[in-house]
Amino acid sequence: MDDPERPGPHADASEIAEWMEDDFGRAVADGIENASGEDQQEVVEVEILNHERGEVVGTIDSDGNLNTESGALRNVSQEYLEEGVPVLAPTTYENEDGEPVHADAEVIVEPGTIGFVRAFIDELPSPFDCDPESIANLPVHNSFRD
């Protein structure tokens, strides 16, 4: 939406009011457009490898869509797809003396959230894994961000 032209210094009250109304409408529309983009993440998909067989046995995406013909991969993945992946997240709390305590808390990373693919791949048992370069580029769960 184009910015409405600001009235000049000699504009009357009705021109200024009309400009303010148009400008407010544009600002609201821009805010809605910007906010809707913040909650959406790009869908990430990676190939899952079976290192014993040396082949790609499936793919997983950030929405939890597993595409595989491997019964073994499907079996080890089912719980993570249904309930999410447990990960340890660093946390800090105060003890009874008011001193900070650093500990790890378990967080469940569910399909559709940032970091799901990374958590999913990290939890797969051997022989399943993904290409190390792919892992390096995967986003981690929000709890790990500064």
Image: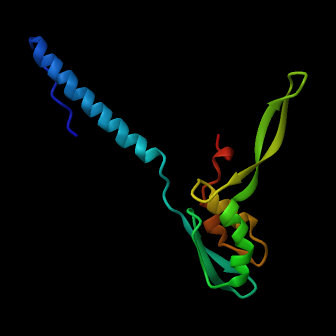
Residue 73 placement, left or right of 20: right
Task: Please state which of residues 100 and 61 is positioned toward the viewer in this rendering.
Answer: 61
The image's colour scheme reads: rainbow
Quadrant housing residue 83 = bottom right
Rendered view: 23 above or below 32? above
Residue 42 pos. (x, y %):
48, 58
Work out whether residue 23 can be spotted: yes
Determine whether 84 is above or below 35 in the image.
Answer: below
Residue 72 sits in which quadrant?
A: bottom right
- The number of discs equals 0
Q: Where in the figure is residue 50, as x and y percent of width and height? A: 71, 81
Tell me if residue 9 can be seen: no
Q: Residue at x 65, y 51 (%)?
A: 141
Q: Of all residues shown, which one is farthest toward the bottom?
A: 53
Farthest residue, direction front = 82
Quarter of the picture containing the C terminus is top right
Residue 113 position (above or below residue 31): below
Q: Residue furthest right?
A: 97
Q: Is residue 89 above or below residue 15?
A: below
> Quadrant location of residue 63?
bottom right
Q: What's the residue at 74%, 74% (across, down)?
A: 76
Residue at left 13%, top 12%?
A: 13
Quarter of the picture containing the N terminus is: top left
Residue at the location (61% across, 67% down)? 134
x, y percentage for residue 71? Answer: 70, 83
Q: Nearer the viewer, residue 138 or 117?
A: 117
Residue 23 position within the rendered picture, expressed as x and y whole percent measured from the top left: 23, 27
